[in-house]
Amino acid sequence: MSFVEYSEFIQEGDVAIIFLGHDSMMPIKVQQGAQTQTRYGVIRHSKDLIGQRFGTKVTCSKGGWVYVLHPTPELWTLNLPHRTQILYTTDIANITMMLELKPGSVVCESGTGSGSLSHAILRTIAPTGHLHTVEFHQQRAEKAAEEFREHRVGHLVTVRNQDVCKEGFGVTGVADAVFLDIPSPWEAIQHAKSAMKKQGGRVCSFSPCIEQVQKTCEALAGQGFEEISTVEVLLRVHEVRSITLPLPDFGPDKPLETPTDTRIPSNASVLCKTTTPPREMAGHTGYLTFATKPRIHCLFYLQFVYFGLIMWI
Amino acid sequence: MADNEDDDSQQRVNEGDYVVLKRGDIYKAVQIQKKKKTVFEKQWFFLDNAVGELYGTTFEVVSGGTLQPRKPKHVEHAADAKEAGTDNRHILDDGKSQKLTRDDIETLKEQGLKGQEIVQQLIENSTTFRDKTEFAQEKYIKKKKKKYENSVMVLRPSCRILAMMYHGREPGKICHLRYDTLAQMLTLGNIHAGSKVLVFETCAGLVLGAVMERMGGYGSVVQMYPGGGPVRAGVESFGFPPHFNETLHEFPIQHVNALLAGTLDTDAKDIDADGLQANGEKSDPTSPKKAENKKESPDAEDQNMETNSSENSAAEKEAQEREKRREIRGQEKKVRMEEKRKKLAAAAVLLQGRNADGLVIASRFHPCPVLLGLIKFLAPSRPFVVYSQYKEPLIECYTKLREQGGAVSLRLTDSWIRHYQVLPNRTHPVLLMSGGGGYLLSGTTVTTDTPKVNTEPTSVEEPAAKRVKLEEETE
């Protein structure tokens, strides 16, 4: 098992997702001799999990059963321990596509937070890309690094415990894409620019507040970014239901000749297969601002190089 | 100090490259071919001058239809904070404020004035410009620039750009799949390098290309196709390197049942590898035809040897050559059919293990039978995503899947996207918004072995342990 590669059978040390029922799941670490308590009973790792196929049904001690699923970044996002507010799959999907991430991409990200987006990025850029992720909170940085190792993606990521606004990403001129989810992204735009490859790249900033968006767009424009665009995305869930709608009784069509059994039964109803929205839905997560760093044109760059040389001498 | 020389060849446009032309929000995918006239936004021009330039370069279309690279830092400091009004209470919208006529503007265009210069002329000849507020002036300039702009940017194609292009230009070709919905599909389907993904789409190849981009040339993609042959025009526009083709396979759906039943014989020479049925291209008739050809040519030769009258020899040589050509064509056809058969066999091998890692469906066909048919090829604990322009067919899919089992975490969703205009003191959502981008049904497969403990075959999502209280489904 790894978060960037499927495997068929469950092994010791794997992370697996126990599916308990409608929207109810939990992550577990598979270990010899370990046990996991669920509302349907106990799952014995050695007997029930190790050696079994992902996706099979596991019967618990009390008789109920659950499914064991192979972890994916999407399942992880729904089950990971929150250390911060996280990004959910809807935003993650758009970020991935709009930043043009693909195998081999080099990405810079800050802040790492709980690693929700990080896992999705790693899945997309594997096996040849790399993620440089920066987190200014020491414990969160350490926890993230630990999780990446457990999830067998450590070789694809470098975690740095520093402040991106002051010290940048720790690399320059290597990134195809930069992602910012920090309180003051406008302070990191310059660092984002220098972390990116000179042939250009994409940048994204996620901010819950419109004021942050305004400042960020200003900073982006000031630093020469193009194609600046702000969007928000929301997911609407449709819950499939069979509903029964009773029919009204307007009385008999013709006047009754005999007062007995020509009446339509008053409990006639119609069955409809339809969807209903949930009572509440996520109305706002954050605004996504994207921009493109244009290529520093050769001539232009050489001018800087010349200037730099002259300064040196 | 980095030298750009090595990178540059990769970053420069080459002849034959597939690129995307951009002006504002309008995109068009074209292939760079020298001396070929391209039309884009009502302008005709040649792309020749783009060859050798860097991707991302903006060009001006000059008279004669050639492209000229624009100087890199085209910084337009719009706000010459001259005169501006405070509000529009005295501005009359009588259509008479612009003194230049249409003809005047045409003349200016013919004189070769650049877009920006035309805009400047319009400003100077507008009686109301200086009464407008600063914001209104900016808006006016932006609007005129957009109209008289002459620039074309040449971009490298990507899923993002092509998805936006198709959705803007030809949504009907892609079943009105909006780009954010496509983004959801790629992520929910866990499309990544090294996996084996099945794709069934009638979106001109956009979905297939998007999947291939996320696979990066690793793993394999099997395109299941209806009818005669796989449609992949959109895939070309991505400009993938040639080795990506090795990961792309195809399989005609009309052989799916046979494959599932184990009765598909891919070694049979007369297998209908194309999936073409009754349209005269059947492999069977060609074999007797070839046999006829072979028989005929020796006959023709014999005839040639027997007759020695010179008047007939020319005509007979003709006939002989025709026979030869027919034979060559026949041979070529045989080779092609064999190639196709081999490809079919290879695809069948990938499928028959029933261990695919992902399934993506996006077509104009009713999704229910497509899903139920193709889901059998997926390994357990793997995601699938079905797109439909309409909701009801997916409701059916959902219901049928719940009945038959084998899938959990079924979700019917659609995504909502809104663009914002972000300007100082003028930040608000953009006025027009996309009305809909289609619906998605997503889920994860699980094994379908019958439970040992529980007897009822109903809802697989709610393991009904009899001794434990079932949690009520709260809204």
Image: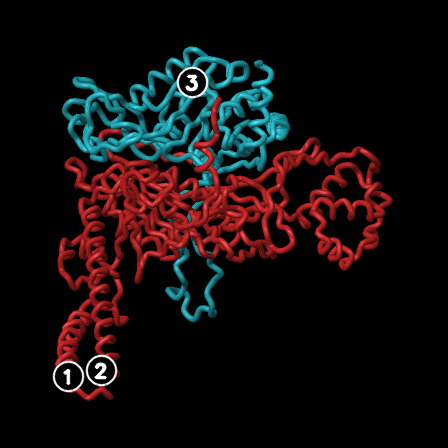
Chain colours: A cyan, B red
Q: Quadrant of the C terminus of chain B?
A: top left
User: Disc 1 vs disc 2: Cβ atoms closer than 8 Å?
Assistant: yes
Tag 1: amino acid = Gln
- Residue at (26%, 27%) from the top-left corner? A16
Would residue B427 appear left or right of A242 to someone viewing this image? Answer: right
| Residue B246 percent coordinates (x, y) | 28, 45
Q: CA distance from mark 1 to mark 2?
A: 8 Å
Q: CA distance from mark 3 to mark 2?
A: 88 Å
Would residue B15 appear left or right of B333 to someone viewing this image? Answer: right
Tag 2: amino acid = Glu
Vertical order, B156 against B312 (above or below): above
Label at residue B316: 2
Marks 1 and 2, the one that precedes in the sequence: 1
Which class describes the residues within 10 Å of circle 3: few (<14), some (14-19), or many (20+)? few
- Residue at (36%, 34%) from the top-left corner? A103
Label at residue B32: none
Residue lying furthest right in this view?
B90
Vertical order, B459 against B313 (above or below): above
Chain where mark 3 sits: A
User: Disc 3 vs disc 2: Cβ atoms closer than 8 Å?
Assistant: no
